[in-house]
Amino acid sequence: MFCQQCEQTAKGVACTTVGVCGKNEEVADLQDLLIHATQGLCLYSDAARKKGFTDPATSLFICEAIFSTLTNVNFDPKRFANMITKAVELREKMKVKSGASFTAPAATFTPAKDIAGLVEQGKKVGLKTDEDEDIRSLKHITLFGLKGVAAYADHARILGKEDDAVYAYIDKAMTTILRTDLEVGELVSLALECGEANLKAMELLDAGNTGKFGHPVPTSVPLGAKKGKAILVSGHDLQDLELILKQTEGKGINIYTHGEMLPCHGYPELKKYGHFHGHYGTAWQNQKKEFADFPGAVIMTTNCIQDPKAYMDSIFTSGLVGWPGVAHLGDKNFTPAINKALAMPGFSADTDKGSVMVGFARNAVLGVAGQVIEAVKNKDIRHFFLVGGCDGAKPGRNYYSELVDKIPADCMVLTLACGKFRFFDKQLGDIGGIPRLLDIGQCNDAYSAIQIAVALAGAFECGVNDLPLSMILSWYEQKAVAILLTLLHLGIKDIRLGPSLPAFITPNVLNVLVENFNIMPITTPDADLKAILG
Ligand code: SF4
């Protein structure tokens, strides 16, 4: 195996024997083969589109296949084997529709009959076989960005929002990176286009979430427990959460969010449920301890799942998440999890662990835009820091909590995604009644952050790069790659990125990013604050 798609990759280079995430060689090879099979499907889907034929069901499958290979989503060999077979079946259908004929191995291979055979086929494919390291680096950037785009497009589709422009880009990019004649410049353009497609996908998801559940409103979320039976919902899927809330109504079970589900408490159509109690635990990398201590059932709706062997009988997966031996509720009937929660002890007493505020997405923040603009003009607000992105296990991530501690009291801190669990419960006070710490939402709510920045730039009649705003981002998996490409596509400069730079970016490619966007690694909180504030 050769995998370097996430931030925790072994030795900062690549996982070659087993993944730090728990992915074994068998699953890694099957993931490589699924990407290969999907590239063959995309060749024909792209050709069919050029003849005026599109098939939303095929495009949705392509998104699901790519999303399944994102870090910490699916570890189940059987489900990968089924998807590989389905990709080839769909490829043959699209071949007929397109009338085209390709000779590339991805377009012609026949899948082996069993998992062992598929694994052998998987060993022979993958971007590791590209020779030029800069070309491979740029192809990796695009492929990993595509995984983020596919994830957001899949979430949006679940909520009934889709746009063929996103699917068309995915087809084009998946097939373009098969080519061996590409120059650096062409691949840089393809990667920036990935950022554009991701902006569209995040916009669709924003429309899906706010259209169905309303615009988030500032909401206080308890961090303690309520006596009684309990279900913990993790991942990112708001639709799954709503179904769980509906299916547990009147059953005496309280519903808690975990990780990236925290912002769900701010959505009017979710917060209206009386048994939607509060938030439990912190970021994904602490789940082994937190899930083992939870006295009810746990449901993983999307990434990031870790090895659940200590609580195999009380964890359930839905959507694209999978772990061998874990009950998968693919039909969205959550009865097995509900029955498990009823059989478990639940919380024995009420506990008070304080609360946090959520719900400061674009509508809420722009609702007080006049106040914010006035405060900037009066110099009550000196600077905005967007401190957001993924969390992870590396010790270097303490940078982000230390930074927030040291940001001066006349500066605002905007945050999103699970990196905020390093500081989400800090009491940072307010500036003229506006809380200094504003939680915009999940990682995909980067769309909301962009809208806020664009609106502020409009109010101050300047560009986003001229605002008193600094972006200090943390990354872990491939949705963060997609968001970074979106920011670069929008021409945002001076982004600080940590805790370490991606292993798949070569020095030459990094130079391109530095020259064009002045992207830079984080250093120390003191040095970075001095550089930003003077
Ligand atoms: S996803 Fe990350 S941790 Fe898992 S195998 Fe790949 S690089 Fe390693």
Image: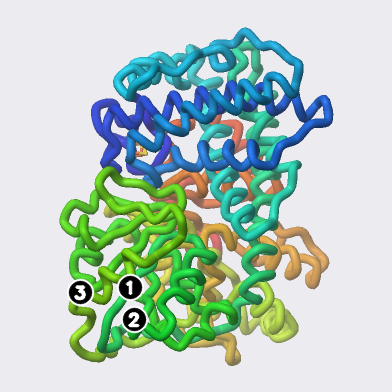
Kind of element beneath mark 2: strand
The image shows residue 455 at horizontal and vertical percentages of 75, 68
Residue 111 in the image: above or below residue 346: above
Kind of element beneath mark 1: strand
Q: Is residue 33 left or right of residue 102?
A: left
Residue visible at 44% across and 64% down in the picture: 260
Question: Which is more N-terminal, label 2 or label 1?
Answer: 1
Identity, as a three-letter code, of the amino acid under mark 2: Ile
> Which residue position holds label 1?
231
> Which residue position holds label 3?
344
Q: CA distance from mark 1 to mark 2?
A: 7 Å
At label 2, counting other C-alpha atoms closer than 10 Å, the crowd grade (few under 14, some 14-19, many 20 or more) is many
Q: CA distance from mark 3 to mark 1?
A: 10 Å
What scheme was used to colour the molecule? rainbow
Closer to viewer: mark 3 or mark 1: 3
Q: Is residue 518 visible?
A: no
Identity, as a three-letter code, of the amino acid under mark 3: Met
The image shows residue 479 at horizontal and vertical percentages of 51, 48
Marks 1 and 2 in Cβ contact (< 8 Å): yes
Question: Which is more N-terminal, label 2 or label 3?
Answer: 2
Q: Nearer the viewer, residue 261 or 366?
A: 261
> Which residue position holds label 2?
253
Residue 6 in the image: above or below residue 38: below
Mark number displayed over residue 209: none
Residue 506 in the image: above or below residue 161: above
How many badges with numbers are in the image? 3
At label 3, counting other C-alpha atoms closer than 10 Å, the crowd grade (few under 14, some 14-19, many 20 or more) is some
Quadrant where the N terminus sits is: top left
Identity, as a three-letter code, of the amino acid under mark 1: Ile
Residue visible at 26% across and 76% down in the picture: 342
Residue visible at 26% across and 69% down in the picture: 340
Marks 3 and 1 in Cβ contact (< 8 Å): no
